[in-house]
Amino acid sequence: MLTGVWLLVALIVSIIVMIFMISKLKVHPFLAILTVSTVLALFSLPIDEIPGTINAGFGGTMTSIGIVIILGSLIGFVVEKTGAAVKIADVVVRLVGKRFPELALLIMGWIVSIPVFCDSGFVILSPIRKSLRARTKKSAVAMTVCLSLGLYASHVFIPPTPGPVAAAAYLGLADNLLLVIGMGALVSVFALVPSYLFAKYIGKRVQSKEDRDQEIQDSFEELKDEYGKLPNAWLSFAPIVIPVLAMALGSLANIFGWGRFFTFIGAPVIALFIGVIMSVILLFVTGQIKDFNPLTNENLKIVGPIIFITAAGGVLGRVIADAGVVEFVKENAGNLRMLGILFPFIIAAILKIAQGSSTVAITTTAAMMGLFTDPNSITAALGFTTPAAAALVVMAIGAGSMTVSHANDSYFWVVTNLSGLSAEQGYKTQTLGTLVSGIGAIIGIALLSLVFM
């Protein structure tokens, strides 16, 4: 069996092979991660222990976050299909005003992508972006970048999006999602501010087809007509806001001893189930309750692969923990601690650049880091041993997973194709914009680590 530095070399080779399988051989991430985990286990664990390690890693992950991911995704699906996402965007535009269309798009993207995947969010909000551009005659490129990066920030930082939920569970914060949500909202500021400034800058230097198109279309009103009668603002926000409030009450109940009821509703799985109930009410109001079963089936088809990839990441994390990689890290913690919060950021960024999926980058990196309460985890070995510190690690992983979006990322092509950008312009806007956003986020995370660690 491999030990010491050779074990670390084997881990690095395993990651390279995994990236190659996913990005070049087009092997599904679930199979790639599971295969690499099994081979690594063969070189580092007694053969009779390997089945138990694989089962424990897979089953433990499914137990902790499987239901949470399903419920969170279902909420987002209903918010999208009922037109509630469009209503949320409309409210943001009214609040911010048409004088600042870029800022309006940045904020509405950030809000909508909390429950909705960024790819879907960009598709939903793109007609609003076009309508605002037609009305204001501002730069279409600046608006595209603001919408794209606003969506991306909450996608990688804020539960109930599956990536941050999975990362929180891997690091031991599955029952403390409110902390992760709060930290994600705070870190988002450090990503959104430079994103907005970059959008204003690049909008003056790059012109898309939309900037050269003088035809004015009231596409937002057309989008509203497609959905029919939109739900009111309160009901539109409720599936997102009420679960957050429930988790907040649960946290306060633990602090002040308010009783078991508030602790119960504050558990993430219960809070998100309440959000699903609010989503069902949305379906009633919009006359789409007959579609609830088909929507649920469609959502499960989409979220299923994410859960399995996440569980496969749990296998990799368990193999790393049992193989003795952590012991080697502890022995060399003095050198690795110099990287501090940059360590998970760099790992996630390498995975993101290499294979394209932010969710895969988040889940794989988080699985490698392990529980902050486990003395045998890399997270603990690097000194991240409090809930706040673990939440910052989740944020660093998220920041790395958005750095950067390029041609192997489906989101890159969604943004460029729907906004009239060429691939070359996409690199100047989307790719460079995600670099600016990710660097802004990790700088903010490093500053926050001086306070919380």
Image: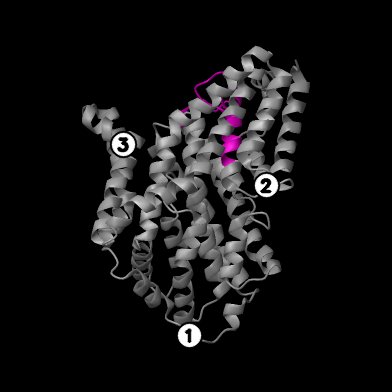
Q: Which mark is residue 216?
A: 1
Mark 2 and mark 3 lie on one chain; the one further toward the N terminus is 3
The crowd level at tag 1 (other Cα within 10 Å; few <14, some 14-19, many 20+) is: few
How far is disc 1 from disc 3 in space, using C-alphas?
Answer: 46 Å
In the picture of the structure, the residue carrying the numbered disc 3 is: 270
SS at badge 3:
helix
Q: Residue at x 52, y 51 (%)?
A: 190
Q: Position of residue 90 (x, y in %)?
A: 36, 68
338 and 6: which one is in front?
Answer: 6
**Mark 1 or mark 3, which has the lower sequence index?**
1
Q: CA distance from mark 2 to mark 3?
A: 34 Å
**Residue under label 2:** 355
Residue drawn where x is 65% and y is 60% of the image: 432
Q: Which amino acid type is shown beneath numbered disc 1?
A: Ile
Report the span colored magenta.
Answer: 362-387
| 2 and 3 marks in contact (CB < 8 Å) | no
Q: Quadrant of residue 254?
A: top left
Pair 1/2: label in front: 2
Q: Secondary structure at mark 2?
A: helix
